[in-house]
Amino acid sequence: MSSATIARRELSASWRGPMIAVVAIFATLLLGMAVYTQMDVEIFDTLPEVARNLMGVPEGAGVETLAYSYMLDTLGSMVLGGIAIAIGARAVAGEESDGTLSLVLGAGSSRAGFAAWKGCALALLVTLSGVAMWASAELAPIVLGIEKGDAMLAASLTHLTANALLHGFLAFAIGAATGRKGLAVAVSAAVMVLGWLLAGLLPLFDETTEFAEFVPWTWFNGNQPLLNGFDGGHLALQLGSVLLLFVVGIVGFTRRDLRIATTTGLLQRLRSLPALGALSERFAISARSRGLFALLFSQRLALVSIIAIGMFLLMGVVMGPLYSVMADQLGQLTASLPAELMAMMGAGDMSTAEGFYWGETMGLMAPVAVIVVGVAAASGGIAGQEKARHLSLVLAAPVPRLRIVASSAAVMAVYVAVVSIATMAGICAGSAVAGLGMDPLAIAGAGVHLLLLGCVYGAVALVVAAATGRPGAAIWASAGLAVVGHFTSAYLGLSENTEAWAVISPFHFYALDDPLINGASWESVVVLSALALVLMVASFPLFQRRDLRIN
């Protein structure tokens, strides 16, 4: 197979995700700017200099600069970084796990050439996505008829794209060197999230400021390129790391044994389970159905375990003592910020333990965690098995189609529950360690909201997977809706003219009535449960009535 063919295959398989992400970012940027223009710009001039610098808002600047800072530096970086990780992990390890690697290499491609062209395709996709995001950021204020302010978009998007490339090639290197896609995704995502957290926390203390320079996320946003322009040293570190990881991935791939002869069908894997071998033939059908759940559950177990542990320790336990150390500074900062601005940031009253935990953990990171595991389970259960051509073996068992959907939905709900419980347990532990006195029942109520939110977007992925049989479509559709839903809830509620429309977003009900303080809202529980249930039920006839790709 020629090098051009390898690159074209990768580009054709991966272009949809970046396209959807760019469109979603553009839509939320338009929405955010439209809402900001209805706010009093003078509230930013009342902020202390330190607060303006932290938020990326220069003195005298309009709210458009804040929109860029939040939409691009926070949301855009996470979205593009996540896309790069997904593409990088699948580039080599995905081909190996799908059993197609032996066919590609057997067509005359060398290992080094295969990995190199896969890496080039990854670099091209991420770079084009960054350029498209830059174009959308330039276009947004023109569409709305406003000025873009003093934002240095070229510098910001260059650093942002380099940051996504770094994490994408980390996933590429791990996947190519080990052949394990799940490990590549989990480690790279953990590095990205931990880097984001450390880059924000380490500079707050004199004793730890110098260590921030060793964090890759600092190379992206430590010098605030949106305000200050390019940082040549940080950009060199980013691109140098990308090149090093590219070489590590190629070398690691060429020097290891490949797992290309052990690929087995799903039915054979079910039969290999000891519990199934001991059962009599008359109970084979029900046993295989139970084995199907066990197999689907085990497919993303490494990813779920790493995310659950990270949420428990980093975003739960650690945040309690951290709040105790920063309580005075947070109280002063909160007092200096206008109430409208705090609402726009979605942080609440950061002077309280509940507000701090909501702003740091529950506002963004926890929803991302449960949505990631829920979507992974829902897309992999139906569409993943169909793409791998395992469904013919499953249906021949015979296992009814409805049982396949039910197993996928059950695994999705269990994954989301595991991460939700780990997050809430971490918050309880952090509160206990630091003596914050947070109400365990209220924390549990917030956990119910989190679980149901994850099930809603997991059910979206389940419906798309059932209707199309394409894991990529399920992942990007649910991710795009989640991004739009989050910012629809955050921004529509800021203006009296649009706040009534905020109810169209599941995130509105997720955050309703300050669940970390007041516990679960029955209105939220009913609405989110009903939405998740309706979506799950809709997936059954969609999967039952369409033709499957099983050969």
Image: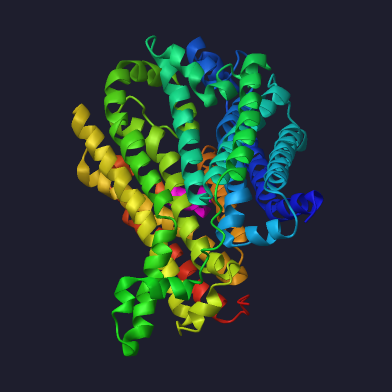
Task: Tally the numbered discs.
Answer: 0
Q: Quadrant of the C terminus?
A: bottom right
Residue at left 55%, top 19%? 222
Is the magenta region chiefly helix, strand or loop? helix
Q: Position of residue 519 (x, y in %)?
A: 27, 47
Q: Return the residue found at the far bottom.
A: 282
Q: Position of residue 296 (x, y in %)?
A: 43, 65
Read off the magenta span.
Answer: 499-509
Q: Position of residue 272 (x, y in %)?
A: 39, 72
Q: Quadrant of the N terminus?
A: bottom right
Say which of 334 and 270 sits in front.
Answer: 270
320 vs 205, left or right, is left
Say which of 486 and 508 sits in front.
Answer: 486
Say which of 374 and 452 sits in front.
Answer: 374
Say which of 195 and 455 sits in front.
Answer: 195
Residue at left 47%, top 34%? 191
Can residue 338 be seen here? The reply is: no
